[in-house]
Amino acid sequence: KEISPKSMNHLVQDLKGALQVETVLDRNLNPAIREGDLILKAGDKRIENNWELLRLFTESQRSQKLLVLRDGVKLKVVLSSNDVTEEV
Protein backbone atom coordinates (compact mmCIF):
# COMPACT_ATOMS: atom_id res chain seq x y z
CA LYS A 1 0.00 0.00 0.00
CA GLU A 2 1.44 3.37 -0.99
CA ILE A 3 1.55 6.03 1.72
CA SER A 4 1.60 9.70 0.82
CA PRO A 5 4.11 12.13 2.30
CA LYS A 6 1.23 13.85 4.10
CA SER A 7 0.21 10.60 5.82
CA MET A 8 3.82 9.83 6.72
CA ASN A 9 4.27 13.21 8.43
CA HIS A 10 2.69 12.06 11.71
CA LEU A 11 4.62 8.74 11.69
CA VAL A 12 8.15 9.97 11.18
CA GLN A 13 9.98 13.22 10.56
CA ASP A 14 10.10 12.43 6.87
CA LEU A 15 8.58 14.34 3.99
CA LYS A 16 8.73 11.52 1.45
CA GLY A 17 6.32 8.64 0.89
CA ALA A 18 6.86 4.94 1.51
CA LEU A 19 5.26 1.53 0.97
CA GLN A 20 3.41 -0.22 3.76
CA VAL A 21 3.47 -4.01 3.86
CA GLU A 22 -0.12 -5.26 4.04
CA THR A 23 0.43 -9.02 3.64
CA VAL A 24 3.46 -11.30 3.66
CA LEU A 25 2.62 -14.12 1.25
CA ASP A 26 5.56 -16.42 1.98
CA ARG A 27 6.94 -16.17 5.51
CA ASN A 28 9.50 -18.91 4.75
CA LEU A 29 10.96 -16.77 1.95
CA ASN A 30 10.72 -13.48 3.87
CA PRO A 31 10.86 -14.15 7.62
CA ALA A 32 12.13 -10.64 8.47
CA ILE A 33 9.23 -8.78 6.82
CA ARG A 34 6.14 -8.03 8.93
CA GLU A 35 2.70 -6.66 8.14
CA GLY A 36 2.70 -2.94 8.87
CA ASP A 37 6.39 -2.41 8.03
CA LEU A 38 7.04 0.79 6.10
CA ILE A 39 9.55 0.23 3.30
CA LEU A 40 11.66 3.38 3.07
CA LYS A 41 14.61 2.29 0.89
CA ALA A 42 15.81 -0.60 -1.25
CA GLY A 43 19.60 -0.50 -1.35
CA ASP A 44 20.36 3.22 -1.33
CA LYS A 45 17.29 4.19 -3.36
CA ARG A 46 14.26 5.78 -1.78
CA ILE A 47 11.07 3.79 -2.53
CA GLU A 48 7.82 5.71 -2.79
CA ASN A 49 5.66 3.48 -5.01
CA ASN A 50 5.18 -0.17 -5.92
CA TRP A 51 6.82 0.05 -9.34
CA GLU A 52 10.07 1.45 -7.96
CA LEU A 53 10.42 -1.64 -5.79
CA LEU A 54 9.25 -4.18 -8.39
CA ARG A 55 11.68 -2.88 -11.04
CA LEU A 56 14.63 -3.77 -8.82
CA PHE A 57 13.88 -7.51 -9.01
CA THR A 58 15.24 -9.41 -12.03
CA GLU A 59 16.08 -13.02 -12.84
CA SER A 60 19.60 -12.50 -11.54
CA GLN A 61 18.64 -10.16 -8.65
CA ARG A 62 16.00 -11.97 -6.59
CA SER A 63 16.56 -10.20 -3.29
CA GLN A 64 16.92 -6.62 -2.09
CA LYS A 65 18.25 -5.12 1.12
CA LEU A 66 15.57 -2.85 2.54
CA LEU A 67 15.42 -0.14 5.15
CA VAL A 68 12.07 -0.44 6.92
CA LEU A 69 10.40 1.44 9.73
CA ARG A 70 8.74 -0.85 12.29
CA ASP A 71 7.19 0.51 15.46
CA GLY A 72 9.22 3.71 15.12
CA VAL A 73 12.54 1.88 14.68
CA LYS A 74 14.50 1.73 11.41
CA LEU A 75 15.66 -1.80 10.57
CA LYS A 76 17.65 -3.38 7.73
CA VAL A 77 16.00 -6.51 6.32
CA VAL A 78 16.14 -8.58 3.11
CA LEU A 79 13.15 -9.03 0.78
CA SER A 80 13.28 -12.00 -1.61
CA SER A 81 11.14 -12.80 -4.64
CA ASN A 82 9.98 -16.00 -6.32
CA ASP A 83 9.54 -16.54 -10.04
CA VAL A 84 5.82 -17.30 -10.44
CA THR A 85 5.74 -16.93 -14.23
CA GLU A 86 4.84 -20.57 -14.84
CA GLU A 87 2.13 -20.49 -12.17
CA VAL A 88 0.24 -17.65 -13.86
Image: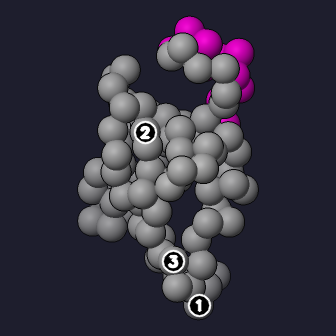
Measure the alpha-carbon separation of dots 3 and 2. 20 Å
Q: Nearer the viewer, residue 38 or 76?
A: 76
Q: Which residue is mark 2?
A: 68
Helix, strand or loop under label 3: loop
Q: Which residue is mark 3?
A: 61
Q: Residue furthest front?
A: 44
Magenta segment: does it hold 6? yes
Left or right of 60 in this view: 77: left
- Looking at the image, is mark 1 or mark 3 nearer the viewer? 3
Measure the alpha-carbon separation of dots 1 and 3. 18 Å
Left or right of 68 in this view: 58: right
Quarter of the view holding residue 6: top right
Provide the residue span drawn in magenta.
1-11
- Looking at the image, is mark 1 or mark 2 nearer the viewer? 2
Q: Which residue is mark 1?
A: 86
Helix, strand or loop under label 2: strand
Q: Earlier in the sequence, mark 3 or mark 2?
A: 3
Measure the alpha-carbon separation of dots 1 and 2. 31 Å
Up-down: is 19 above or below 16? below
Q: Earlier in the sequence, mark 1 or mark 3?
A: 3
Q: Are marks 1 and 2 in contact (CB under 8 Å)?
A: no
From the top left corner, tell me how far across and down residue 4 is, in percent: 71, 26
From the top left corner, tell me how far across and down residue 56 is, in percent: 61, 66
Helix, strand or loop under label 1: helix
Up-down: is 2 above or below 87? above
